[in-house]
Amino acid sequence: MLALSRRMREVMLAPKGGRFSYEATRGFELAGKTLGIIGMGHIGQRVARLAQAFEMHVLAFDIEEPAQVASELGFTFVPLNELLAHAEIISLHAPLVPATWHILNRETLAKCQTGVIIINTARGSLIDTLALREALDSGQVGGAGLDVLEDERVLRAPASKIIAADIIAHLRSDALAYDARDADRIRELEDLMLGDAVLARPNVVCTPHVAFNSIEAVERLQQMTVENITAFAEGRPAHVVG
């Protein structure tokens, strides 16, 4: 969010030794802006706390709306369409379930403010990648911060290398077996190319999906895993996802 608001990637990609334009790369401050959070679980609530520190207004959408949490953290639960219409920045923190698959698509992105900033650190398929690319091209979306994609292989290697490796695997394998799933392979290639095109844009900031990989976070994950197994063995399942 900070990198996009100050257009850091665009500044860093500016030609070296040429004429630098402060006006062309001028960003904006977070204070006073409206942040829309989709998914108000533990992570969404932490984001709301951070947004308060930046003096942002926070709107939230979730299937559950605990009034006490909203009161304590100083945000407001609203219907999804209202969040889309008023948020200048939208941050996704929802699980991937049938109801949230492509929750941001052509229709919902069209309901957003022109130039909205999209942040997705949850699940890649919460966003329709083709719709996002089109919205970035048109200016409906002003920038995107992505830690996940529908096909995350392009976060680790260029699409050209992935496709070349796929072709080699095809040549070394039973071609007839591959032909049986040609439609699936075509969709995979389309997702790869779309993801590659999105990440190449100067107003898109991508991170390699490693937020979990700190010593402390891994310890918490391991501790929770032990607690879940123990609770299940004792007949009292914990942290059940519906």
Image: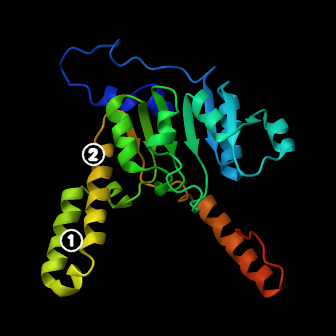
The residue at the far front in this view is 107
Mark 1 secondary-structure assignment: helix
Q: Relative to the observer, which residue lies in front, 106 or 22? A: 106
Q: Which residue is mark 1?
A: 166
Q: Residue furthest left?
A: 171
Circle 1 packing at 10 Å, graded few (<14), some (14-19), many (20+), is: some
Q: Residue 20 in the image: x percent, y percent?
A: 26, 15
Q: Is residue 2 rendered to the left or right of residue 219? A: left
Task: Please say which color scheme the image uses.
Answer: rainbow
Residue 234 found in image quarter? bottom right
What residue sits right under mark 2 in the picture? Answer: 197
Residue 61: image location, x then y, percent: 68, 43
Above or below, 148 relative to 89: below
Please name the residue shown 45% across and 32% down the image. 3
Name the N-terminal-most of marks 2 and 1.
1
Q: Give the secondary structure at mark 2.
A: helix
The residue sitting at 28% across, 42% down in the picture is 200
Looking at numbered disc 1 in the image, what kind of residue is underneath it? Asp
Q: Residue at x 48, y 41 (%)?
A: 107
Residue at left 78%, top 77%?
237
Give residue 10's position: percent from left, percent from top: 33, 28
Looking at the figure, which quarter contains the C terminus? bottom right
Closer to the camera in the image, 46 or 201 = 201
The reply, left or right, for residue 233 in relation to residue 201 is right
Q: Quadrant of residue 73?
A: top right
